[in-house]
């Protein structure tokens, strides 16, 4: 499939890199881009050679939000009947391999929400996060009012959603929205390093860890603990657990077979 709004490539045949690519509109997220992103994510998730996916944008913008020109004339009926957002924005939630957001520049509105849908965010020092929808007479619509408070707490999430102000990378790291901040010229290298590290581990264990951490956001603590324990027990049925522990005991590097 050829894409117009994204580009894709692989590194070391293991890491898939998807780059949002509508530079003239600061990677504003329109239907075509989200359809292409969904197709690329699904393709890489199904590719057995791929162990980790990186989602990134340009130096100036990860994504400046949903495409305002496309939304400007929407009626309620257009948004509701067309299932605006859910239709082609939720694919990323069903991707089972890790997805890392490498964010430089603006991650605003739907762009911030898209970054938060990834498993973790590595930010360049020029990154700016925000939910400025309030300035347009709307509110975040792709999980921003739910994921932002879970990431940064109620007070800061309310501040962001009600004033529309931006948060810089330092504040975002302090608040827990991003996992690391790196110099802009090191963003790709640092993200690729993290992705390759993940690829070297047991893929079954990686997928189980992702599934279990996500469970922390969807149910009670008691349910999450049981869920984690079941997966933990199940991993003792894998060849990779035998390899990982044998390698440790015999003081040699592990060579996981991903099964
Ligand atoms: C469509 C956009 C856009 C967007 C920028 N552009 N953001 N087009 N939708 N979200 C376009 C501009 O119109 C302009 O096009 C070009 O990109 C460059 O932008 P400038 O404004 O000239 O750049 P700059 O002065 O550097 O300002 C950057 C900016 C600003 C601060 C990021 O562009 C901005 O405030 N953008 C809107 C951010 C926003 O409100 N996002 C939330 C959208 S609502 P031309 O043709 O003039 O060169 C949303 C709802 C989510 O996301 C709901 C669920 C998905």
Image (cartoon, grey):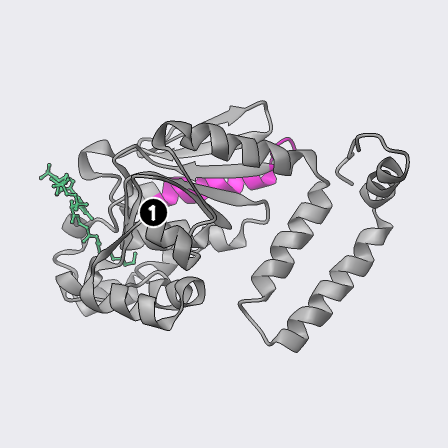
Quadrant housing the C terminus: top right
Identify the residue at the far top of this view: 12
- Our reading of the magenta stretch's main secondary structure is helix
**Foreground pick, 89 / 105:** 105
Q: Is residue 49 magenta?
A: yes
Q: Is residue 64 magenta?
A: no
Residue assigned mark 1: 169
**Foreground pick, 246 / 251:** 251
Mark 1 neighbour class, 10 Å CA radius: few under 14, some 14 to 19, many 20 or more: many
149 relative to 127 in the view: left or right: right
Q: Which span of residues is magenta-colored?
A: 34-51
**Foreground pick, 33 / 50:** 50
Where residue 55 appears, as percent x and y from the top left, is 43, 39
Do we see residue 1 in this rendering?
no
Do we see residue 41 in this rendering?
yes
Q: Quadrant of residue 133?
A: bottom left
């Amino acid at each position: 499939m050829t894409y117009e709004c994204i580009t894709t490539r692989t590194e070391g045949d293991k890491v898939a890199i998807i780059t949002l690519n509508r530079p003239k509109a600061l990677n504003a997220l329109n239907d075509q881009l989200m359809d292409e992103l969904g197709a690329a994510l699904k393709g890489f998730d199904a590719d057995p050679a791929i162990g980790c996916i990186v989602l990134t944008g340009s130096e100036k913008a990860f994504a400046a939000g949903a495409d305002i020109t496309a939304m400007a004339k929407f009626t309620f009926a257009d948004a509701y009947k067309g299932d605006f957002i859910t239709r082609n924005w939720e694919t990323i939630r069903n991707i089972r391999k890790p997805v890392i957001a490498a964010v430089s520049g603006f991650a605003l509105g739907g762009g911030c929400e898209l970054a938060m849908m990834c498993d973790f965010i590595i930010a360049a020092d020029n990154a700016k996060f925000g939910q400025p929808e309030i300035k347009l007479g709307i509110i975040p619509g792709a999980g921003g009012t739910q994921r932002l408070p879970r990431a940064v707490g109620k007070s800061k999430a309310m501040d962001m959603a009600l004033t529309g102000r931006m948060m810089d990378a330092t504040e975002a790291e302090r608040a827990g929205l991003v996992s690391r901040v790196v110099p802009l010229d090191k963003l790709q290298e640092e993200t690729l390093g993290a992705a390759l590290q993940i690829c070297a581990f047991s893929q079954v264990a990686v997928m189980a860890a992702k599934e279990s951490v996500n469970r922390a956001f969807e149910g009670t603590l008691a349910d999450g603990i049981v869920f984690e324990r079941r997966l933990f027990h199940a991993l003792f049925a894998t060849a990779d657990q035998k390899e990982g522990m044998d390698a440790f005991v015999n003081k040699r590097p592990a060579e996981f077979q991903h099964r």
